């Protein structure tokens, strides 16, 4: 099974690192195919903590080639900050390759992201403010800047000029901000060109050859299913395709070459930013789960909204992504809860819905219908096989598997790399 997609099944922060840890030794390429430095993962290796935002997690494994695919949007300042930070800690980053077709996040898009949110007021999305949305909008409007434009100064200057003709109107007339200067923006970007050049390649061709040579390629999604711009809780979503389909367009690996889809599902639910969240817990209940799970954002430090597991969402994620393996994370956080509520369906305006409703209006009105599972008190953080888990935890997992309609291949029981109940190999 050489080409595998790894996605989040909920609203992000499911702990995809658990799955990459499990397959780390078997993987040759890790491809980031969507998003930018709005993502955030913390990786702990030999007691050292690394917080990555833009770089694929494979950067920390010497045998892996990390790839930034064409579907990614890159803030070059952040890219080089992360690379410098790793180099300073003795990590060799020279294996990184970057697609010539990936888009660049210019400084004016960071400004626009922030001022747009401010102007939206109550209707804001709660973005990470990193310029992600405006940069994808530029890509679709065909006024975006790509990595390859750095190597043709004339073209770059023309493109910046074209983009700023519109953007400066917006910045000055609508948002009352300073206009961006063509020269300043162009020169800032050009300042990175020489250093970037050796990393840039035709990544779709590289990955095609890798697969032909029998290499194992993991395509790792940023964000998650319900933040996908097409399949998520629009408009409270990110601006890229974070579901399995996006792995193809964002990497150039065709669907027919993808062999498996691993969906990572947290044993409860979290969300950052605005938007509907049917099983959300408020007040002391929310605080308890947030504290137990350490639910504060890696990228923004924001407290995450917390709630019970929602298997309507789990089923939906299986359907949209074609999940072949579920990796359940943070089961240990539920220790001590009795009973453990799981949302199995919604009641919407008096009608039971077993599947995601068709419209966002209905989703906003969704009231969870819970089933209550027996809890467990025993510390499960040392469990490595299913038999090590208390019967109640096993029953909980069996129910999740059945309701989410996909087999569970691994279960995270603690933050350490080795704290995993491994059930089935993820690379087959
Ligand atoms: P943007 O991606 O910065 O445009 O933000 C859009 C929405 O996606 C906001 O609700 C963010 O909080 C959310 N989001 C973006 N990246 C992540 C992530 O890595 N984890 C969780 N939520 C995210």
Image: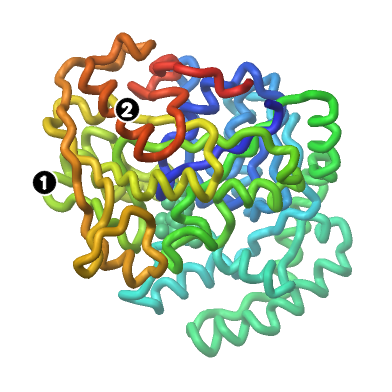
Q: Quadrant of the C terminus?
A: top right
Mark 2 CB lies closer than 8 A to ligand 1: no
Q: Please provide percent x and percent y for residue 198.
A: 83, 40
**Label 2: element kind:** helix
> In the shown orientation, is residue 187 left or right of residue 296?
right
> In the shown orientation, is residue 171 left or right of residue 272?
right
> In the shown orientation, is residue 167 left or right of residue 395?
right
**Label 1: element kind:** helix
330, above or below 109, in the image: above
Q: Is residue 361 visible?
A: yes
Q: Which mark is residue 284?
A: 1
- Between disc 1 and disc 2, the foreground one is 2
Closer-to-camera residue (360/239): 360
Label tally: 2
Q: Which mark is residue 377?
A: none
**Residue bearing the label numbered 2:** 397
367, above or below 87, in the image: below
């Amino acid at each position: 099974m050489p080409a595998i997609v790894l996605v989040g099944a909920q609203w992000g922060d499911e702990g995809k690192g658990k799955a990459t840890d499990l397959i780390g030794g078997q993987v040759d390429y890790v491809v980031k195919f969507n998003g930018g430095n709005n993502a955030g993962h913390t990786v702990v290796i030999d007691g050292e903590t690394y917080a990555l935002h833009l770089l694929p997690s494979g950067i920390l494994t010497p045998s892996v080639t990390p790839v930034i695919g064409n579907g990614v949007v890159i803030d070059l300042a952040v890219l080089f900050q992360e690379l410098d930070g790793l180099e300073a800690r003795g990590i060799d980053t020279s294996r990184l390759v970057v697609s010539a077709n990936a888009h660049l996040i210019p400084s004016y898009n960071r400004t626009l992201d922030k001022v747009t949110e401010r102007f939206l007021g109550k209707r804001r999305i709660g973005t990470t403010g990193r310029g992600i949305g405006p940069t994808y909008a530029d890509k679709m409007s065909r006024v975006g800047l790509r990595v390859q434009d750095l190597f043709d100064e004339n073209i770059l200057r023309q493109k910046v000029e074209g983009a700023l003709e519109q953007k400066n109107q917006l910045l000055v007339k609508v948002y009352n901000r300073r206009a961006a200067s063509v020269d300043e923006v162009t020169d800032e970007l050009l300042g990175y060109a020489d250093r970037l050049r050796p990393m840039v390649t035709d990544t779709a061709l590289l990955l095609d050859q890798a697969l032909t040579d029998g290499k194992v390629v993991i395509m790792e999604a940023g964000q998650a299913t319900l933040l996908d711009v097409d399949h998520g809780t629009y408009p409270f979503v990110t601006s890229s395709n974070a579901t399995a389909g996006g792995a193809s367009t964002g990497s150039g690996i065709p669907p027919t070459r993808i062999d498996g889809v691993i969906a990572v599902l947290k044993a409860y639910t979290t969300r950052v930013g605005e938007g509907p969240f049917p099983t959300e817990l408020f007040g002391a209940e929310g605080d308890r789960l947030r504290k137990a799970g350490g639910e504060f954002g890696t990228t923004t430090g924001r407290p995450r909204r917390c709630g019970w597991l929602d298997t309507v969402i789990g089923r939906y994620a299986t359907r949209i992504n074609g999940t072949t393996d579920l990796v359940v994370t943070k089961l240990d956080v539920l220790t001590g809860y009795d009973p453990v509520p799981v949302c199995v369906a919604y009641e919407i305006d008096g009608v039971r819905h077993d599947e995601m409703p068709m419209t966002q209006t209905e989703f906003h009105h969704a009231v969870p219908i819970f089933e209550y599972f027996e809890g467990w008190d025993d510390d499960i953080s040392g469990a490595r096989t299913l038999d090590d888990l208390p019967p109640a935890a096993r029953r909980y997992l069996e129910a999740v598997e059945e309701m989410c309609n996909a087999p569970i291949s691994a279960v995270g029981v603690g933050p350490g790399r080795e704290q995993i109940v491994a059930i089935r190999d993820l690379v087959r």
